[in-house]
Amino acid sequence: MKFAYIVFFISIAIWLFPAIRQYKTNLFYFFLILALEDPAVSIVTLLLDILDPTFVHSIASMLLFYSIDFNLDNIKKNWILNVILVVCFFIGLLVIDNNFFLIIIIHTLILGKFIKYIVIRLHNKSETNLFYLVLIFYELTILVNLIVFLSENNIGYMLHYITLAFQFLIAIFFTVFRVDNPILVRSLRSSI
């Protein structure tokens, strides 16, 4: 049990650095929510003993979804879609017995946003940003972790720690590189 606590506190510490590093980028709020999610879950579940930790993770996941390229004009422009999404989210919180399913759905939508960004950039500029490819990989590790956790088998614990190790490496990558770093942009245009 002590090992799990050590890993938990290392995880909290390591995810603070990407939030600091991504300050003043379009993904700052995304990384800030990632950094605050685990401490918030710990504090809320300690103070409100009856609250399910997955409830807080669900809300944090929804905030992550809206934090990607946050723009009030886009939210106002697509207000009907956003109202439908928020209403569906709260209905899901009330209706779905296991919030892990809701978290999986939201992280799938986040993954879709990152893939959409890559595809649009490929189409418009014939280039890609490796930062977003790493974000896609990170979201995939989250989804794999959640799905394996739901399967409730013995391999799940081992896979959890393997994906956690990958997530630590990803956090280091996000600490070293900013999303706007030109080194990470790769042109896919043919030189012929």
Image (cartoon, grey):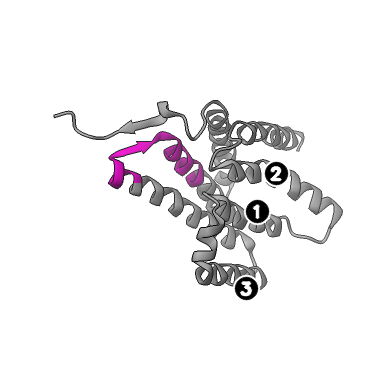
Query: Considering depth in this image, is 170 or 164 the residue closer to the camera?
Result: 170
Local packing at callout 2 (Cα closer than 10 Å; few below 14, some 14-19, many 20+) is some
Amino acid on which the number 2 mark rests in the picture = Leu
| Most distant residue in the front direction | 73
Q: CA distance from mark 3 to mark 1?
A: 16 Å
Q: Look at the image and tell me in which quarter the N terminus lies.
A: top right
> Compared with residue 33, is residue 84 higher up or lower down, i.e. above or below?
below
**Location of residue 135 in the rendering, given as x and y in whole percent from the top left corner:** 48, 41
Identify the residue under disc 3. Answer: 91
Q: Is residue 88 visible?
A: yes
The residue shown at (65%, 42%) is 32
> Compared with residue 82, is residue 15 higher up or lower down, i.e. above or below?
above
- SS for dot 3: helix
Query: Considering depth in this image, is 37 or 118 the residue closer to the camera?
Result: 118
Residue 60 badge: 1
Q: Earlier in the sequence, mark 2 or mark 1?
A: 2
Q: CA distance from mark 2 to mark 1?
A: 9 Å
Residue 36 badge: 2
**Location of residue 64 in the rendering, given as x and y in whole percent from the top left corner:** 59, 51
Q: Residues in magenta?
A: 121-140
Local packing at callout 1 (Cα closer than 10 Å; few below 14, some 14-19, many 20+) is many
